[in-house]
Image: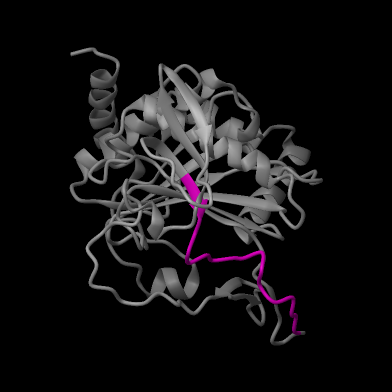
Amino acid sequence: MGDMRKDYILERDVIVHPTTKKSTSSKKCPYCPGNESMTNPSLLSLVAKDGMLQRLQDGEDFFVTDWSVRVFESKEPAVSTSTPNTYSDRPLYSEPAYGYHYIVVASPNHKESLATIDTEQWSNVLVVVQDRLRWLYTQKGVTYVSIFVNHGKESGADVQHSHINMVSFSTLPPRIEDEAESSHKILNEKGVCPMCQAVSTESTGPRQILQTEGFVAFCPWAPSYPFEFWISPKKHATSFSKITQKEINDVSLILRATLGGLTKEVKDVSFNLAFHLSPEKKNSRQIHWHIEVYPITGHWSGLERGYGVFLNTISPEKAAEALGAACRKELAGLVGID
């Protein structure tokens, strides 16, 4: 199992995780129906039956079939609850890479992606994600739960079958800690949530892509990636685990429409998607939760890697114009408007 190391000066977190994966000639996808034995047993399998959704799980001698969403522990986890409890001091600081790593298979259909599944299926996926999120925050040693997607060959995905990763940490990831601290500082100094301020500004501006009843998608003012966009609740909200079924359906609609629009506007695009959520355990630093989508259209240069200064080859205004047209067309098809 891996260990969590910190950089000498910046204390950047790095999980050193030598892979144990062996090359195989098998062309079977481990996430496809019928191949359940190739993964760990499901902790939750969502099965549609007689118009109802049943929550089942694999047994010792059987696998749930006819599932629509399936959750199991990763066979190549980035973190583990069985990692050795060893530490080392600075300058060579390390600690156990402790946590849970779940895979949420988003569809039984290998050819479908998060940009093509229907909105009802997206809602089912988010219901399962919310269920696992709530459970994880009841476990000892879980300070934060990351939820992210690697889509496409350039995204870092090991398996191309559409799925979501859920990885817990015993400490706050640096990006979330920085975001929470900055949000808290701005809130104290100006009396306003910075994301609420951004939502208010972008909802009617040239970087807006799409809106639903409760959510807005927009290209951020200073994007790190071409065609990067964020999806945020319009009203101030800090907890994804507490959103209602109506809100799940609403965010499912805008996710499906924007990802569908992105993949039609930028052909064969790989992307990463990350939920930025507040930590839900004894932490006063909260953030306005939102989703960030990072299309991968090129490679970083020495400017980005060496200095943390990002060079963007398309303005967010132009990106939003192109994405907006594609996403609105996608939304119209989803809600039955020609």
Q: Residue furthest bottom?
A: 91
Which residue is at 24% across, 36% downward?
322
- Where is 40 relative to 209, above or below? below
Q: Which residues are magenta?
A: 71-88
Q: Residue furthest top?
A: 337
Could you say which is closer to the camera, residue 235 or residue 310? 235
In this image, 255 relative to 130: left or right? left
Residue 205 visible, this angle: no
Determine if residue 240 is in view.
yes
Asked which colour scheme the image uses, the reply is one colour
Image coordinates for residue 326, horizontal then vertical, percent: 23, 31
Question: Where's the C terminus, which quadrant?
Answer: top left
In the image, residue 237 lies in the stretch drawn in magenta: no
> Please, what is the dominant secondary structure of the magenta stretch?
loop
Q: Is residue 113 above or below residue 7?
A: above
Residue drawn at the location 34% of the way across and 57% of the way down: 30
How many labels sit on residues? 0
Q: Position of residue 135 (x, y in %)?
A: 67, 42
Position of 168 compared to 125: left or right? right
Q: Quadrant of residue 131?
A: top right
Quarter occupied by the N terminus:
bottom right
Q: In which image quadrant can residue 171 be found?
A: bottom right
Residue ID at (73%, 50%): 139
- Decide whether residue 73 is among the magenta residues: yes
Q: Nearer the viewer, residue 113 or 33?
A: 33
Q: Position of residue 193 (x, y in %)?
A: 67, 34
Q: Position of residue 77 (x, y in %)?
A: 52, 65
Q: In the image, what residue occupies the spot 34% across and 47% down?
A: 162
